[in-house]
Amino acid sequence: MKAVRLHNYLQKCVIEEVADPVIGGPFDVIVRIGGAGLCRTDLHIIEGQWKEKSNVALPYTLGHENAGWVHAVGSAVSHVAVGDTVIVHPLVTCGFCFPCRGGHDMHCENSAFPGISTDGGFAQFLKTSARSVVKLDPSLAPKDIAALADAGLTAYHAVKKSSALLYPGTAAVVIGAGGLGHIGIQVLRALTPATIIVVDRSERALELAKQLGADHAVLANGKQIDTVKQITGGFGAEVVLDFVGEGGAIADGIAFLRRAGSYSIIGYGGALNVPLIDIISTETNFVGNLVGTYTDLVELMTLTAAGKVTLHTKTYPLEAFNDSVDDLDHGRLQGRGILVPA
């Protein structure tokens, strides 16, 4: 099969022929990829930022946002069959450790992360496990929903964790209306009654945010802190969801918060440097978000099937992977890039 392979950090990936995956255990599932989402994490992997965290041996295949059709199953798999349309939870998990038993799949003590720590889905086929596949209505095209497997899942997970704080009369600020942020806006609208304030440097992105349900679209032009404070009566927002996590977004996000507010970190690349006295005196909460659970993904797909969450995407053939990376890196890609194997 054809696959996108990373041979060396800080160098372009290559498209090459590799062996097809094969069933090796009773709970294995092989998915024929119909769409694989391009994530900013893929850029960070190529740059070497995940080298120490993943300990992966190069070369390997990238791609951790995957959807397609079941191609083959192990002898113990009964909830999906060959030909079923599926979306793939990002992690392969054991099901037996304490986090798995508690429903916190993404913290499995024996997990593999295809596309980060093992071969991923920028290929014609992906090997995963029965615990990772969510059966979908066949009317859903994998290329249209693939990015929900991680970008959508992470956004949903972050909003769901924040939803208890967002009762009527509260405000949530979304920093960044790009690939993850435009999903987060829709999930906020579906799960909470909060006033949604979106901040972005791009007027194009803000226009999309308004179409997706934002109550206020604020251009990051140097006056965004004053504007958000004005919208929130001078107090700030109860929740900030930071889908950027670098540059000036972090300082802005802290300034957007009211006292006892919750800063939910989804994007990354920067560093948090806040005096502890400031955290204590304001009772600010900083919350990390790592993908989401299997049940989070099932719930997100329910919203998607109901038409409450849609993806803004651009598709590329697998052979154009490096072009898609270049578009993402230089800000030419609005929404999510999706690689579609021939």
Image: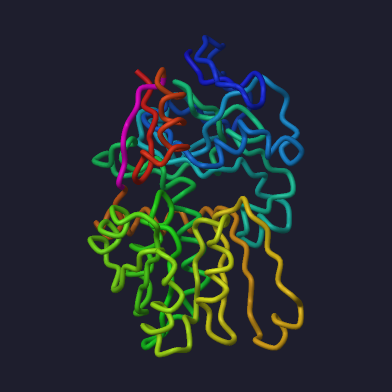
- Res. 210 image quadrant: bottom left
Q: Quadrant of the C terminus?
A: top left
Q: Position of residue 239 (x, y in %)?
A: 50, 76
Q: Nearer the viewer, residue 117 or 126?
A: 117
Q: Which residues are magenta?
A: 312-318
Q: Nearer the viewer, residue 86 or 238?
A: 238
Residue sitting at x 48%, y 88%: 235
Q: Position of residue 341 (x, y in %)?
A: 38, 22
Residue sitting at x 44%, y 45%: 134
| View extreme (front): residue | 222
| View extreme (top): residue | 17
Q: Main secondary structure of the magenta part?
A: strand
Above/below status of 22 relative to 175: above
- Res. 54 image quadrant: top right
Q: Position of residue 246 (x, y in %)?
A: 58, 55
Residue sitting at x 53%, y 16%: 14
Colouring method of the image: rainbow
Residue sitting at x 29%, y 44%: 137
